């Protein structure tokens, strides 16, 4: 009972490397033959050497970075246009007070934001700083006058 599953070295081709399966080439012979045929079918590829230039220094592109003072000037001009619109709406009797109030709140917010940006900008022009301060003062004064009812007829 001791030899139930005995493996014979002659019957199992994987155990004894010297015994080949009948009618089959070894894997290495098959590979050599196939690779040889492929090499015969291929045209000889010539390796050409080409000299390449080294990396050159990249030239700086002309980047148009926005000028901080130009941006602040644009925002000041936009705020001035809002103030002109506010003045025109005050003179127009058909415009509701709600429309004027929302415009005045926008003006006040924009004036405060402009003043904050100008005060935090180190390269802001002194004239623009003065204009921003005047806008903020004017917006606060107008807000107080509007809330107090100075423009009611």
Image (tube, rainbow, N blue to C red):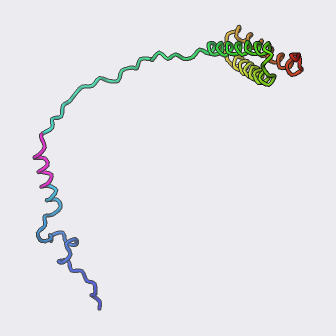
Query: In this rendering, would 30 be left or right of 121?
Result: left
Q: Residue 104: horizontal and vertical position, in percent?
A: 78, 20
In this orientation, which residue lies closer to the viewer: 81 or 42? 81
Residue 26, compared with residue 85, is above or below; it is below
Asked whether, in this view, residue 48 is left or right of residue 124, the answer is left
In this rendering, is residue 79 above or below 6? above
The residue lying furthest to the bottom in this view is 1
**Image quarter of the C terminus:** top right
Q: Nearer the viewer, residue 118 or 134?
A: 134
91 vs 127, nearest the viewer = 91
Give the farthest residue toward the front.
Answer: 94
Q: Report the span colored magenta.
A: 33-43
Verify whether residue 39 appears in magenta: yes
Residue drawn 41% across the image and 17% down it: 59
- Which residue is found at the position 21% from the left and 80% from the top? 8
x and y percentages locating residue 32 in the rendered image:
14, 55
Q: Which quarter of the rendered picture does the N terminus lie within?
A: bottom left
Q: Position of residue 50 (x, y in %)?
A: 22, 27
Task: Please name the residue shown 71% across and 7% down the image.
Answer: 127
Residue closest to the far top = 127
Front in this rendered view, residue 102 or 37: 102
Q: Is residue 2 left or right of residue 71?
A: left
Is the magenta region chiefly helix, strand or loop? Answer: helix
């Amino acid at each position: 009972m001791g030899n139930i599953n005995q493996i014979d070295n002659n019957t199992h081709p994987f155990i004894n490397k010297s015994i080949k399966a009948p009618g089959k080439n070894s894997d290495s012979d098959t590979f050599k033959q196939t690779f040889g045929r492929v090499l015969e079918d291929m045209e000889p590829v010539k390796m050409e050497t080409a000299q390449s230039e080294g990396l050159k220094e990249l030239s700086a592109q002309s980047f148009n970075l926005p000028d901080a003072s130009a941006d602040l000037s644009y925002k000041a001009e936009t705020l001035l246009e809002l103030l002109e619109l506010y003045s025109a709406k005050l003179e127009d009797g058909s415009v509701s007070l709600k429309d004027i109030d929302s415009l005045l709140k926008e003006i006040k917010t924009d004036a405060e934001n402009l003043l904050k940006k100008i005060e935090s900008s180190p390269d802001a022009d002194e004239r623009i700083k003065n204009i921003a301060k005047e806008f903020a003062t004017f917006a606060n004064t107008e807000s107080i006058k509007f809330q107090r009812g100075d423009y009611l007829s």
